[in-house]
Image (tube, rainbow, N blue to C red):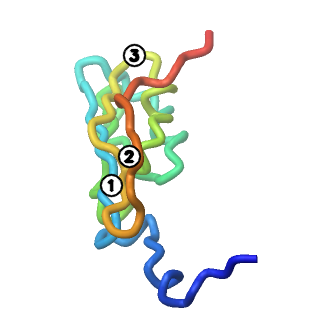
Amino acid sequence: MSYIRLRDRLRIPTYDNVKYVTTGTVTFDHEKCNGCGMCVKICPGRALLLKGEGKGKKAYMLDDEITPCLSCNCCAAICSKDAVLSRVYFDFNYYYKVIHRGEFNAPRKFI
């Protein structure tokens, strides 16, 4: 049975500490965005919000130090207008070594 040492346990990064992680980045094409808010509702990191009134509502990303984007790409998957563009991976900087990372592709859509 293997045990984790206290020193190793203290070095495990947490997703909300900006010292240990680079958060994801999401951008929006506001020409295509219709302000439905589905991306805001589905975001597990609560990193998105709607701004504006009435039909002028558009989705925006919050400051990444407050609520981190986890790069799950759920917002891009649920957007029917293809207005969401994921740009940067959520990445641990400190303790973990990335073995392999492929292209950042849009998720499959099931119709």
- Residue 23: mark: 1
What percent of the width, then of the height, locates residue 59?
Answer: 34, 37
In front here: 29 or 4? 4
The mark lying in front, picked from 1 and 2, is 1
The residue to which callout 2 is attached is 49
On the picture, is 25 further left or further right than 47?
left
Residue at x-position 35% and y-position 29%: 103
On the picture, is 55 further left or further right than 44?
left
Q: How many numbered dots are placed on residues in this image?
A: 3
* Mark 3 or mark 2, earlier in chain: 2
The residue to which callout 3 is attached is 81
Tag 1 near tag 2, CB within 8 Å: no
Q: Residue furthest bottom?
A: 6
SS state under label 1: loop
Q: Which amino acid, mark 2? A: Leu
* Mark 1 or mark 2, earlier in chain: 1
Quarter of the picture containing the C terminus is top right
In the rendered image of this protein, does residue 107 appear above or below residue 39? above
Q: Which amino acid, mark 3? A: Lys
Quarter of the picture containing the N terminus is bottom right
